[in-house]
Amino acid sequence: MRDLFRFLYRIRDTLLFLALLLIALVLLYNGNMHHRSIAINSSNAVAGTLFTWRNQVTEYTNLREVNARLVEENTAWRNRFGIGADVMDSTLRPAGDSAIWQPFTFTAAKVVHATYHKPLNYLTLDQGSVSHLHEDMGVVGPSGIVGVVRAVSPRFASVISVLNTDLRTSVKVKRTGHFGLLYWNTMDAATASVIDIPKHGRVREQDTIVTMGGDGIFPPGVPVGEVLSVDNPPGRPDLNVRIRLFEDMARVGYVYVVEDRLRSERDSLESLQPTR
Amino acid sequence: MITTLASNLGRFFLLVLLQVLILERLDVANGWIVPYLYVLFLLMLPFELPNWAGMLIGAVTGLVLDAFGSTPGMHMSACTVMMFARIHLLRLMAPRDGYEFGMRPTVPRMGLAWFATNAGVLILLHHLWLFFVEMHRFDAFFATLLRAILSAAFTLGLALLTQFLTSRASERARA
C-alpha cells in the first residue's frame, strides 16, 4: 500500500496532466456534439463587452463601406416592392388581417466580432436574449446567409458562421428545386460546397443556391450563393458542387436575425406524431 | 515574489488582450498563418513554479482563450499538453548546475539559442495540437501540418521580436 502511494506521488505530474487533459477533451467533445449545453462561447459578458469596445474603436474606419451597402440594400428592397406599394400597405392594412401576417420576423444586430480565416469560425452579435434572440435562429446579411445562433447571453449572441465545418444547412437549387446541404470544406472565405445533390439534378454553373426553409431556422429562398463549378465524381451518387457565397464574410457588419414564429407550433405538432 | 507575480499577471492580461483583440483577427497569408502569441505568457513563467501550478495555469489560460473563441476545450487541451511537455523539456535543457534562483526563461538571461530552442519546440507542439484538434479530422493532413508549422514559425518570430523589444527596458530596470 505504501509503495502504491509512493508510486502515485512519483507520477503526480502525469496524473494531473491526464486529469486536465480529460476535462479539456470532455469540453471539446461536448462543445462539438451539442454546443448548447456549454457556456464557453463568445456570448459571455466579458468577451462580448471587450469585442464591443474594439468595435467602437474600429467601426469608424469602414463607415463609408457600411453606408454604401445599406444604400444598395435599400435600393434592392425598393425595387422589389415599388415605392408606392409600401406606403399603401402600411396605411390601408386592416388590423389583424391574417393574409399579411408574417411568419418570419427579423431583428437587426451588429457584428462586434467575427473570424473568417480559421476552420471553425464564429461571430459575436451585440443583441441577446433581451432582444428575444435564442439559439437556432438563422442569421442573414444584406446579400445572403451568414450563420446560425449557437448561444445567447442577455446582451450578446454567439453565431456559428457558414464558414464552419460544424454547420450544415439545407439548401436547394433555385432553378430545379433539387436540394442539398451547404457544407464549408473549401477553407476559403469566399466559397463553399453543396453536397448530396443527386446526379440527375442538372446543376449548371451560375445557378443560384437558396435556403430550403422549413427547418425553423431560415425562411425559404434566402440567397446563399452562385454555382462556380460542378464536378461529377465517378462512383459517387451525388454531385460535387462548389459555390461562391453571396455574403462577403470578411466584411459582414450588420445582420438580421430570423425568428420563425411558426416553429414551436410545427415542432409540437410533429412531436405528437407516433415515431413508428 | 510580489514583482514576479505582478509582472506575470500583467503579461497575462496584455498577451490575452493582444491575442483576442488583434492577433485573432489578423489574416496573414489568407488564413495559412494564425499566430497564437499568448503562449509566450506560459513560456515565460518562472522556473521555480511547481509543475502542478504550471499545468493548472496553462489549463486556465487555455480556457480563457476558449471563452473568447467559442472553442471549448481546444486551447485548454493544447496548453495543458504544452505545459506538461515543458516540465520535461526544462529538465532536459537544464544547465549543468540546475536553474539558479531568480533565473528567468528569457533571451537576456538564458541566451538566444536556449530560448529559441525551448520556445520553438513548445510553440510547435502547441500549434500542431491546436490546428489538428481544430480540424477534428485527419483529411487535409498536409495542409493542416503546413498551416501549423508556418503559424508556429510566425509565432516564434513574434515571440523573439517581443523579447528583443522588451529586454532593453527590463535590463534598464534591473540596473
Image (cartoon, grey):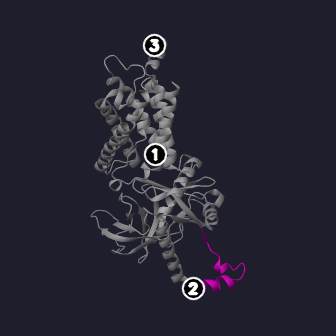
Q: Where B71 sits versus A233, above or below?
A: above
Q: Could you say which is closer to the camera, residue A12 or residue B160?
A: B160
Judge from the rendering whether residue A128 lies leftward or rightward of residue A76; answer left or right.
Answer: right
User: Where does label 1 land, which residue?
Assistant: B18
Mark 3 against mark 1, which lies toward the viewer? Answer: 1
Q: Callout 3: few (<14), some (14-19), or many (20+) C-alpha neighbours within 10 Å?
A: few
Q: Where A168 sits versus B38, above or below?
A: below
Looking at numbered disc 2 in the image, what kind of residue is underneath it? Answer: Ile
Whether the residues at callouts 2 and 1 have beta carbons within 8 Å, the answer is: no
User: Where does label 3 land, which residue?
Assistant: A3
Is there any visible trace of residue B5 in the rendered image?
yes
Q: Where A127 sits versus B93, above or below?
A: below
Looking at numbered disc 1 in the image, what kind of residue is underneath it? Answer: Leu
The magenta stretch spans which residues? A84-106
User: Where does label 2 land, which residue?
Assistant: A83
Secondary structure of residue under mark 3: helix
Q: Position of residue A81 (x, y in %)?
A: 55, 83
- Specify the subunit that label 3 lies on: A
Is there any visible trace of residue B72 in the rendered image?
no
Judge from the rendering whether residue B50 lies leftward or rightward of residue B159; answer left or right.
Answer: right
Q: Position of residue A233 (x, y in %)?
A: 28, 64
Q: Position of residue A213 (x, y in %)?
A: 52, 69
Looking at numbered disc 3 in the image, what kind of residue is underneath it? Answer: Asp
Magenta residue check for B5: no
Judge from the rendering whether residue A23 lies leftward or rightward of residue B129; answer left or right.
Answer: right
Q: Are marks 3 and 1 on the same chain?
A: no
Mark 2 against mark 1, which lies toward the viewer? Answer: 1
Mark 2 against mark 3, which lies toward the viewer? Answer: 2
Mark 2 or mark 3: whose residue is earlier in sequence: 3
Secondary structure of residue under mark 2: helix
Q: Callout 2: few (<14), some (14-19), or many (20+) C-alpha neighbours within 10 Å?
A: few
